[in-house]
Image (cartoon, helix red, strand yellow):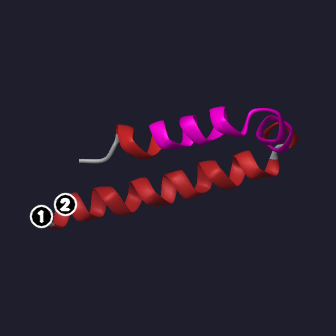
Amino acid sequence: MRNAIQKLKTLAQKMRREVAELKNKAEYNIGFKRHPQTVKLLYHKCRTRDSP
């Protein structure tokens, strides 16, 4: 159980880092303005892919 919690914590950290990197990129802002649905969909896919 503790191992699973640790895995989730590291995954959350990794995701936060990835999201922060995306936000720092200009493409992210441009893409979000042009295709907000696509960005939301991709983000949702990332969220649900690794969830138990």
Q: Which residues are magenta?
A: 29-45
Q: Helix or strand or loop: what does disc 2 sit on?
A: helix
Which quadrant: the N terminus?
bottom left
The image's mark for residue 34 is none
The residue shown at (77%, 41%) is: 32
Label 2 crowding class (10 Å Cα cut-off): few <14, some 14-19, many 20+? few
Q: Helix or strand or loop: what does disc 1 sit on?
A: loop
Mark 1 sits on what residue? 1
**26 left or right, relative to 4:** right
The type of residue carrying mark 1 is Met
The reply to whether discs 1 and 2 touch (Cβ–Cβ < 8 Å) is yes
**Vertically, is 21 above or below 33?**
below
The residue shown at (72%, 45%) is: 22
Residue 8 location (% of width, % of height): 32, 58
Q: Nearer the viewer, residue 27 or 2?
A: 27
Q: Nearer the viewer, residue 52 or 18?
A: 52
Type of secondary structure dominating the magenta stretch: helix
**21 left or right, relative to 44:** right
The residue shown at (55%, 42%) is: 43
Residue 13 location (% of width, % of height): 49, 60
The residue shown at (38%, 42%) is: 48
**Vertically, is 13 above or below 35?**
below
- The number of discs equals 2
The type of residue carrying mark 2 is Asn
Membership of 40 in magenta stretch? yes
**15 left or right, relative to 3:** right
Determine the CA span between mark 1 and mark 2: 5 Å
Mark 2 sits on what residue? 3
Label 1 crowding class (10 Å Cα cut-off): few <14, some 14-19, many 20+? few
Q: Nearer the viewer, residue 8 or 47?
A: 47
Residue at the far front: name it: 37
